Image: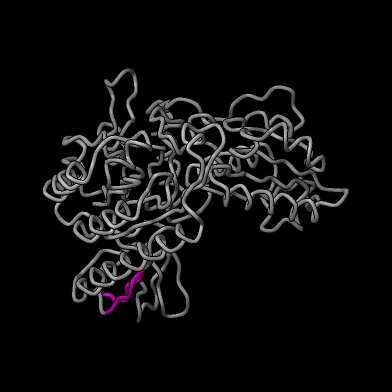
Amino acid sequence: MQEGDGKRSFYLLTLGCPKNTADSEELSGLLISQGLKEAEDPEGADILLLNTCGFIEDARKESIDEIFRLIRLKGKTRQLIVFGCLAQRYRDELMREIPEIDLLFGVNEEERILQEVSGNGSLPTPDPVSLPGRSSTYRYLKIADGCNRGCSFCAIPSIKGPFSSIPPEKLLVKARRFISSGAREIILVAQETTSYEWDTGKYRLEDLIRDITRIEGDFRVRLHYFSPYAVREELLEEMALNPKVCKYVDIPLQHSEEGVLRLMRRGGNRDFFRDLIEKIRKIVPGVTLRSTFIVGFPGETERDFEGLLDFVEEVGFDRLGAFLYSREEETPAWPLGDPVPIEVKEKRYHELISLQERISLQKNLALSGKRLRVLVDETDGGVAIGRHEGQSPEIDGVTLIRKAGGIRPGEFIYTIITDGNEYDLEGVPA
């Protein structure tokens, strides 16, 4: 429904990973640059857009549920556009089974969406400097797409194609725009940021970090995600010495036991990963380490799982995520079946998460009395809600700052930590 000024409006819902968030924010800016307004809820929009995730079964179910929710809302006057990973992976099935979808696009088709929505057959690409920027304390900057790794459980290469780095000049323009619009944390995202190389390796991730952090302003840079097979000392040294870079390493290992890793088509073993983590902690003192693991992969025995628990306890990650194995079509692991019963997967998941909660509680309580620099994301009465450099938005906990009257979102506040639990910290202004 058009606004009083005659402008059409759109509502954009994003599911899935931060890379999808980055794509949606770019599309939103493009739509606004063409004269559309962004609505806060679907009821107030002429156009409903859904950026889907199709990575695992739970994500697909969520995407399908949201499609049908928006179908119920759209009625006869609104247009529903579905795009992203699910649409890329199951385009024919969605077109056949859900004819209520008005337009369907895959990944990296934002310009086609823009053309359809604007009604223009061909559109000049707007100057990124002039694109509107959402006001937020943090923004995701996608530096590459696709993946070359070929892990047996993962459908990303078949959805997004091979790894492709985005030219640095484009990234620097976006970074400047984010900072000028108020962002105080720029989060570099890719399937593996550590694989970033432009022009056959002449310009690498550490070069990009240096160039971004030379931009004027008080902000910090965070990296997601490290590959355990592509961690260079030069990158770690840049992280250790550059005051604008968060000392935070998110390095999905997926498992610790060599037999399971071999079935996953991943290299390494417990000793390799232990040595790597020791190296990271040595070069980057005070680093926060996060990892992700899959439980219930085909062939994972009880002994393998106990080995994983031993490894997690020994290493002592600051943060940890876990997933139940999801059998995915068109992946190399598909022929292995799904032999681990769901109840066994769930039991292992809860054991792993319970172990990590105990470790995280100990680490958070050990921060009591420490003075940390916290970026305030929002305020609620006299409480400010923010994150120190070891807390990434949406996946880690937060720091609650009491007695925070007068503090505004976007400020960096030195905070004395007074308490903590398995996920969050509490403190007061220093």
The magenta segment is: 419-430
Instruction: Give the left or right position of residue 254, taking residue 280 as reference.
Output: right
In x, y percent, where is residue 76? 88, 48
Viewer-proximal residue among 56 and 279: 56
Q: Residue at x 76, y 58 (%)?
A: 43
Q: Residue furthest right?
A: 76
Q: Which quadrant does the C terminus fall into?
A: bottom left
In x, y percent, where is residue 148? 40, 27
Residue 188 painted magenta: no
Vertically, is 239 above or below 290?
above
Residue 429 painted magenta: yes
Viewer-proximal residue among 231 and 109: 231
Q: Residue at x 59, y 49 (%)?
A: 14
Viewer-proximal residue among 286 and 116: 286
In x, y percent, where is residue 75? 85, 52
Instruction: Give the left or right position of residue 115, taking residue 270 as reference.
Output: right
In x, y percent, where is residue 370? 19, 71
Q: Residue furthest top?
A: 200
Residue 129 visible in the snapshot: no
- Figure coloring: one colour
- Which of the 4 image quadrants contains residue 207? top left
Viewer-proximal residue among 75 and 177: 75
How many numbered callouts? 0
Residue 306 visible in the snapshot: yes
- Which of the 4 image quadrants contains residue 171? top left
- Which of the 4 image quadrants contains residue 115? top right
Vertically, is 98 above or below 423?
above
